[in-house]
Image: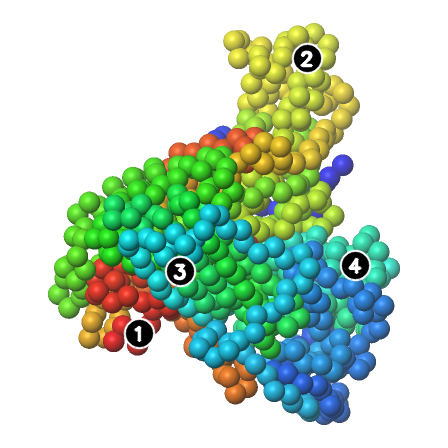
């Protein structure tokens, strides 16, 4: 029986919320807990014997540690231990196979593994003290000496110099092409050939990365970790440290944003575990904002896009090549160019992708990894082609619209992108747009309108879900899912409440604990179609069981009724034709002498059906910019984002996901880039003062439209796809295209800072 785990403090909707249906705009059920401080994050959980670890970060990009002086730190007030590669606990499995479930090919970075330095900012010691303050002070007293070797960090910004593509490890499949893109490009009457560059970006969720390891009396580790999967962190700790999985529980009931940075366990987790094992005490390690720039980032990417078309705008050739960085340790790979073979009808598509290795940490998935940069290049190129053709940019997209994914050569399971274009354009007023650039002005500012298309995967994975109906009328649904702020609690609660016809406050969806039924990592926008479909499946099974019990009781008022004859509502089962004939679920359970009934569901994708289709979510993004030519300042004053992502289950949290994605797209377009100091091979602007993100003053009108779509191939149960990532895709391209429309100046790199406009 899957019971409520009190420590998780799983939220429910407030009393009076009542009955809900999918598609309704319900406020997030975890909202109150978050704003009142009831929600506990990884760094907030307390244990009586808790001590505090502070990480000492390395300062060179490559080389070896020759000596670490820890005497001053060890003699400082309150210090318990200073752990380095020399005195860390020895673990056989740490030394051989230490991989998380999401690790790319290669050998993952292991903190305090040896004297070898792989990147600047690498953790080189952990100072543990009675208080956080003592640990932080002593961390400054650790002196690390290095034998420095020459590093390489910036390849892509100087592509004119020779670079060596990394030889990829086994398992890598280059992107497929179709037809002869090269020849078709050569023969096309109208062409564009442009290069694009996107710099490094960092995730920067509001919550710091933290792990609190509570050391139990029997040596059991209960770990509160900031992660997008409690079960991935448990896997990593139990395998890495050779601890039986029953002796490790990982919890993440509340996560303050992650955006992909929590897809892999971060180094504070193994460090806190090492500390706890060494001291047999509870240990908490929280990283600083600066340290959060030292464990993965959206990789910098260089593109060359060549498009060829007929005079009427019919695409003849798409040729997209990209080069992306990775570390020396791992072959991090992104799906960057593949979208260019999925978005438009084109017989000849050539895609190329290479990776170059250097001395930085392995890049890491960040919201719409691959698409955020890849689709940017393609969609700016499409805009360039539209001007070359003297054609409206939206008309060019419609001219090349396809219901079949060209490279896969399969129809899309559903694709309501045409409706996105139509509704988005109408809401924006696109038909009022003059074709020529530099034709709209408002006082000091030039005004421009731009648009772009977005695409992202419609992923489904496997999950197990338990649904328990209690005699007191409460429904508890559980899965080891995650809510990184995306609305998982809310959306899953809506599905369950609707299925059982219960007021939403009677439903609790419990997530964030590795002992709960298996769930995938919260990534790839797959939670709704995966866990959500699982919730639906578990509730369906529960309804069947309850109906069987209800028809079986003595003198049942619904005797002989089948599922199609009845409805579930407000804690009862009643006949559709005669609602007066009803059975209270609570009384059924009492009659059977049960406190509760549980059903479990194993959600698996419909592989055979899915294989026949290409599966994706789509968007059409329209935006207005105002550019002050004297200052080079850009304001994005209006964005309309029209989304086709299957049935929308939780309208409010889904819309928040999209507007959040748009905010980030604007931020990516105008502000975000982490610069590397080549001399030291380190990120320079590793703080919020110098790494700029969009703030309230940068954001104006954002209008989100969900067009109707119902995809029973992706999710038989819900017809839903996912909305986590599509919101950002295409936004930066729409901004870039609007800037061209305003100024006549084509910007092909992000971020589009004032300096580039002057
Ligand atoms: Mo997302 S980048 O799969 O968290």
Q: Residue at x 63, y 35 (%)?
A: 607
Q: Determine the secondary structure under disc 2.
A: helix
Give the Cα distance between marks 4 and 3: 45 Å
Q: Position of residue 37 (x, y in %)?
A: 55, 58
Label 3: which residue? 305
Give the Cα distance between marks 1 and 4: 50 Å
Q: Is residue 698 above or below residue 712?
A: below
Q: Earlier in the sequence, mark 1 or mark 4?
A: 4
Residue 115 image-quadrant placement: bottom right
Q: Earlier in the sequence, mark 4 or mark 3?
A: 4
Q: Position of residue 543 (x, y in %)?
A: 64, 23
**Residue 298: mark:** none
Label 3 beta carbon less than 8 Å to ligand 1: no
Label 2: which residue? 551
Q: Is residue 119 left or right of residue 114?
A: left
Q: Determine the secondary structure under disc 3.
A: strand
Give the Cα distance between marks 3 and 1: 21 Å
Which-is-in-front pick, marks 2 and 4? 4
Q: Is residue 218 above or below residue 500?
A: below
Q: Position of residue 648 (x, y in %)?
A: 46, 37
Label 4: which residue? 238
Whether tag 4 and tag 3 are in contact, CB under 8 A, the answer is no
Q: Earlier in the sequence, mark 2 or mark 4?
A: 4
Whether tag 2 and tag 4 are in contact, CB under 8 A, the answer is no
Q: Residue at x 18, y 66 (%)?
A: 445
């Amino acid at each position: 029986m899957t019971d409520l785990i009190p420590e998780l403090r799983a939220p429910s909707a407030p009393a009076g919320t009542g009955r809900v249906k999918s598609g309704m705009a319900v406020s997030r059920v975890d909202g109150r807990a978050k704003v009142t401080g009831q929600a506990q994050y990884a760094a907030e959980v307390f244990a009586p014997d808790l001590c505090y670890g502070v990480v000492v970060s390395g300062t060179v990009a490559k080389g070896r540690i020759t000596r670490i002086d820890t005497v001053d730190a060890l003699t400082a007030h309150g210090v318990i231990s200073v752990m380095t590669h020399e005195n860390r606990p020895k673990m056989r499995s740490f030394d051989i196979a230490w991989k998380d479930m999401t690790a790319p090919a290669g050998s993952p970075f292991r903190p305090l593994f040896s004297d070898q330095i792989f990147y600047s900012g690498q953790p080189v010691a952990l100072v543990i003290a009675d208080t956080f303050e003592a640990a932080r002070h002593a961390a400054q007293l650790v002196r690390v000496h290095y034998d420095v070797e020459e590093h390489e960090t910036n390849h892509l910004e100087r592509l004119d110099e020779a670079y060596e593509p990394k030889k990829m490890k086994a398992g890598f499949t280059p992107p497929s092409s179709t037809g002869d893109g090269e020849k078709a490009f050569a023969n096309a009457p109208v062409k564009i050939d442009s290069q694009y560059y996107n710099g490094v970006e960092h995730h920067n969720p509001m919550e710091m990365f933290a792990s609190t390891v509570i050391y139990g009396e029997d040596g059991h580790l209960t770990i509160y970790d900031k992660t997008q999967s409690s079960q991935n962190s448990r896997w990593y700790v139990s395998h890495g440290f050779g601890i039986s999985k029953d002796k490790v529980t990982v919890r993440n009931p509340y996560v303050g944003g992650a955006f992909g940075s929590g897809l892999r366990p971060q180094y504070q987790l193994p460090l806190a575990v090492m500390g706890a094992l060494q001291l047999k005490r509870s240990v908490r390690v929280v990283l600083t904002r600066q340290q959060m720039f030292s464990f993965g980032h959206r990789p910098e990417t260089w593109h060359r896009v060549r498009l060829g078309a007929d005079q009427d705008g019919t695409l003849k050739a798409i040729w997209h090549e990209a080069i992306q960085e990775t570390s020396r340790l791992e072959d991090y790979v992104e799906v960057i160019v593949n979208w260019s073979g999925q978005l438009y009808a084109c017989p000849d598509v050539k895609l190329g992708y290479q990776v170059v290795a250097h001395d930085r940490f392995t890049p890491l998935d960040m919201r719409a990894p691959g698409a955020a940069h890849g689709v940017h290049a393609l969609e700016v190129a499409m805009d360039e082609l539209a001007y070359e053709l003297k054609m409206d940019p939206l008309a060019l997209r419609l001219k090349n619209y396809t219901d079949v994914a060209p490279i896969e050569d399969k129809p899309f399971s559903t694709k309501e992108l045409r409706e996105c274009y139509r509704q988005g354009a109408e809401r924006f007023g696109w038909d009022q747009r003059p074709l020529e650039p530099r034709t709209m002005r408002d006082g000091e500012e030039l005004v421009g309108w731009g648009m772009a298309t977005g695409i992202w995967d419609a992923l489904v994975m496997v999950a197990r879900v338990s649904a328990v109906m209690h005699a007191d009328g409460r429904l508890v649904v559980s899965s080891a899912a995650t809510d990184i702020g995306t609305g998982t609690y809310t959306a899953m609660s809506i599905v369950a409440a609707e299925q059982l016809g219960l007021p939403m406050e009677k439903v609790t969806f419990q997530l964030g604990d590795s002992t709960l039924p298996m769930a995938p990592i919260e990534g790839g926008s797959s939670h709704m179609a995966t866990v959500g479909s699982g919730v639906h499946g578990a509730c369906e099974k529960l309804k069947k069981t309850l109906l069987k019990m209800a028809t079986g009781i003595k003198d049942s008022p619904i005797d002989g009724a089948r599922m199609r004859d009845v409805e579930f509502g407000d804690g009862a089962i009643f006949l559709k034709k005669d609602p007066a004939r009803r059975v209270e679920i609570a009384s059924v359970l009492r009659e059977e002498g049960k406190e509760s009934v549980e059903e479990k569901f194993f959600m698996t994708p419909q592989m055979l059906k899915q294989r026949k289709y290409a599966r994706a979510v789509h968007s059409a993004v329209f935006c207005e910019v105002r550019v002050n030519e004297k200052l080079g300042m850009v304001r994005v004053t209006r964005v309309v984002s029209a989304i086709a992502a299957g049935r929308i289950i939780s309208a409010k949290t889904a819309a928040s996901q999209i507007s959040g994605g748009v905010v980030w797209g604007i931020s990516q377009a105008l502000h975000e880039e982490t610069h590397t100091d080549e001399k030291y091979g380190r990120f320079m602007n590793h703080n919020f003062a110098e790494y700029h993100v969009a703030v309230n003053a940068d954001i104006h009108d954002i209008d989100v439209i969900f067009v109707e779509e119902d995809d029973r191939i992706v999710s038989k149960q819900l017809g839903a796809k996912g909305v986590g990532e599509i919101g950002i895709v295409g936004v930066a391209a729409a901004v870039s295209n609007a800037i061209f429309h305003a100024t006549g100046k084509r910007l092909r790199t992000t971020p589009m800072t004032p300096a580039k406009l002057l």
